[in-house]
Amino acid sequence: MKNINLKKSLVALTTSALIAALAVVIPTTAQAAPTCDDQTVLAGKSSTSITFKKCVGTDFQGANYEIRMPKKFNGTLFLYSHGIRHSTVLPQIPVINPSALDIATGYPEGWRSKLRTFPEVAPGRSPADQETIARTLLSQGYALAGASPRVGGWAVPEHIEANMNLLEEAKTLFPKINKIVSWGDSLGGHISQSMSEQFDSIDAAINLHMAGSADVQFSQLGDVIWLTKTLFDPTIKGHGYENRFPGDPDGYKVFITDIYKVLGVLQTLQANIQKNPVTPAWPDTAPASLKASPIPVRSAIMLLGLLAGIPPQSTTYDASSGPAGPLETTFGLAVNPAVAVLENYSSALGLGILAGYDAQIRCGGVVYDNTKTDYAARLGDNRYTWATALSGNTSINGMLAYLSPLNPAAPRVKGDADAIDCINNQSKYNGKVSTPTITLSQTADAITPAGYVEKFKNLYQGNVSAKEAKPGLLLNIWNKPPDTYTKFSSAGLPITPAVPTTGTSHFMFTNEQIMAMAKLGAAAAKSGKLPSTKTALAAFKKDASIFIDPDFTPALMPQEK
Amino acid sequence: MIRNKSMRRATLVSAIVATGAMLLSTLPAQAATPGVTAKEIKLGISSPLTGSAGLSYGKVPGAMKAYFNYINANGGVYGRKITLVSRDDKYLPVRAATETTNLILKDNVFALVGALGTATHAKAYKAAALAAKNVPDLFVNTGFSGFTNQVKYPTTFMVLPTYAMEAKVIAKAIKDNFPGQPSLLIAQDDEFGTDGVAGFTAAGHKFSAPNVLYPQGYFSTPGRDAAVITSLKGLLALAPGSKPVIVLFGTTDVTAALLKAATDAGVEKSFTWYAGSVGADANTLLALGVKSTTIDGVVSASFMPDAKDLTDPYVKQFVDINTKYNKGITFDNYVLAAMNSAMLTVQALRAAGKDLTRKGVMTAIETKGAKFASAGLVPLGYSATSRIGYNGYWVSQLNAKGEGKPFGGKLVIYTTDSGAGAVEVSTFVRPTMPKNGIPTNS
């Protein structure tokens, strides 16, 4: 079994530790003129020397930014929006926050989701990859820029504001900028898209595994938490922390305690499946009636994934393969997709609890509401497709009955209407595409599943039909896993790959794939047109994991049903 | 200052519109039909070649290829040779989705033929965007009634009757042949069993005990089959002197597991075993270790002749083709069914005419498919409103050799629908086999 790398001994937090961690990061608000200096670095395999001017500064709203302008500038600037970062100071927690924050040194090691407000100028899987991408683009004559909003979390409006301020500054400093490619990944992809819909200063948009609009995104994350609480540990609070940070530490303590509880659930599920993949035991914290049922807990995990929209393919598990032997097909049908959900589930759960908490702070109330959710209807045809993994109709019906609003042991979450409106209005795109826009998405992305892009595509097509957008401005490129990829040891145990499987996990695009997207984006900005399918595929140089098919229709997020 | 979209100046000029109109008028004619050239028709199949389901169904693509090669050796379809691209999905939904997508995008096939399984094909159909691409999805091997939904599956044509139809026929056969005997349903706890239960309910059949429903893979768990046998003994105790009818509505591996468990318990002859068509292949049962003495007497439903019946002209012709074009492969019910589907495919392609298109082949089946020559002993039901293939069953009984003979010595054909319609005895006479098994229809 795959080791999710949970530490076995989760040390209980003491009150003093919590209070020590409860630091409020107050962003700087002092506007400063940018500081610019010339730098010369080496780039590319041939170590070409490139010279550029690097300018850093803080806008009047407190957002930090960085601009890199090559000496041999070709006129196009890439404006990068990074993904979500924590808005809440966290202690060191396995999976959720593996490295302790180092406030004193400014969080230098580059952990993607750590609380920090320094800008990045290019996407990449790691800081080293980001720098490689940046230098390669600089060597090709492109300028780079990026801002980090004055606050963390689901900071869509703040990030767009910071980007707009940055563009003003960049154009003032470097008047030769005449084309702008907006690009971003994850929440940054969402920001990139929202910005290109609102402002005509963007000549092309490149959205990498873009997050969904808040309405569906927070419904998904809320579902992950509610289903975890309901199926595996009813003592998890999950939503509606009474005294929210920073007003009172009590809410924060409950929130941190919840994090440890969900980690405990994940750890137990992992251990139980490892011990008995076919009929694993339920966690001790699960409701008594479920523990006593003949339903294997792996089927509950599978159901959770299907209802919440977590892909059944992960970096280790391809939803198909089984160890050679008599159980090969059974493992492939019944176990593999469920443990894939479990592997993806940790990421979704981590994001869910952090982003949900942030949204509650941001909007002053619970931003998730499932009082009217019909989970049985939501399951739809998946009950047939995944019948074996769900252990058949009787099992499915039993679990759905448990999730019914008529079950007092499974209380629904009543959201705060104003808070929901608040987050939804702050974070949405409407598909009114008016500039060449290219997406690159993983078909089995754990956090921003393919359904989000499908929704975006539908919104755009709806606008085209309504003559509110021009046709031919959206190209969706997909990154898929190999046909099969789960490997087993001689003992029949799955082997987790050292490098996450392409098309899975979250943000696993290679530098070559990102550079291909940059090339396409720059060309689109220059011509005002999308590349042809042939040209787009050629940019990826026969990358077998990349495909373009306008007819490809990944399932919408279940929350859309 | 950053301008808002509303400030964007209008850029459209009438000249562009005019130029666009001129360009449209010079566009080439409709693009070539995928998978069709002057010399070739490329078809695809995603099915299990390996894994547990490969044991039963692994012969299907090879048998279809053998028949197509036979046709190719005799002029092909209007001069075009048929190529069948086969991909192994191991009977796994995600693999089926992947391989079906590969058939469409990489292999560029004209149509799919003989896809197998409900979960697999339902997943594959959507993943490969068969509806959007208008890819003919021919002669699918599943009886799930969901595939009759032409809105969700507008390009799909089933070859099997629905499971509900089969259940209705079984209910009728029990009533006619085993009056007064207790009965029990042991069914797969998914859409397969759901369809079956719906059929029995529609037929008004009442089982003597609650249905035993099990998830697929359940009987892979040691001890489960023996536990079911223990509960069956309880049925005997409730009705001393009876011979309860046990309906097995699942796949062959489960039929085998239960028959072996019954044999081990020494109660195999205490029941009449009525195995649904999906789980009653004698060769597979024997290969899975069921004793021939246990198989002897098992009742089943079928719409095809028995593969061992060499007096049947279709069977004889297919055996000959198998001998020459599928060397080393034992002829059995799976090979027979596969070659029969291949023969239907050839007729569909011919009926679509020389100017072969995807739409054309689907229209051809709708308008002419009910009259296609086929080994099936029951009528085909294709029409503009029905995508169900065979419309009924005959009741067979296996002997110790694994041969399926008409129950009671007389062939009785039942036909029905998937809904509330009655089960009726049919006088259907199948079309004469085309000369040498080579269709010449148009």
Image (cartoon, coloured by chain):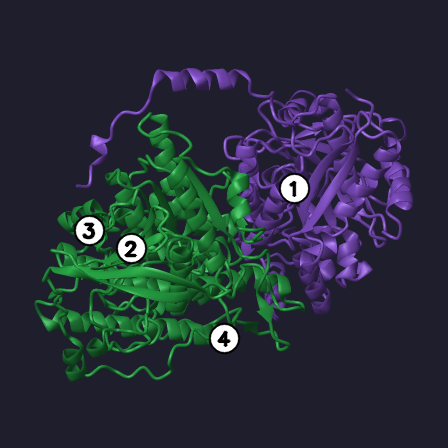
Chain colours: A green, B purple
Q: CA distance from mark 4 to mark 1?
A: 43 Å
| CB under 8 Å between discs 3 and 4 | no
Residue B132 seen from this side: yes
Q: CA distance from mark 2 to mark 4?
A: 46 Å
* Residue at the disc numbered 2: A145
- Name the side, left or right, on which A216 lies relative to A415: right
* Residue at the disc numbered 1: B170
Q: Is residue B8 above or below residue B396?
A: above
* Residue at the disc numbered 3: A169
Q: Amino acid at mark 2?
A: Ala
Q: Is residue B110 above or below residue B96?
A: above
Number of other residues with Cα within 10 Å of mark 2, as a class: few under 14, some 14 to 19, many 20 or more:
many
Labels 1 and 3 share a subunit: no
Q: CA distance from mark 1 to mark 2?
A: 72 Å
| CB under 8 Å between discs 2 and 3 | no
Number of other residues with Cα within 10 Å of mark 4, as a class: few under 14, some 14 to 19, many 20 or more:
some
* Residue at the disc numbered 4: A274
Residue A151 seen from this side: no
Labels 1 and 2 share a subunit: no
Rendered residue at 57%/74% (across/down): A493
Mark closer to the observer (4, 1): 4
Q: Amino acid at mark 3?
A: Glu
Mark closer to the observer (3, 4): 3
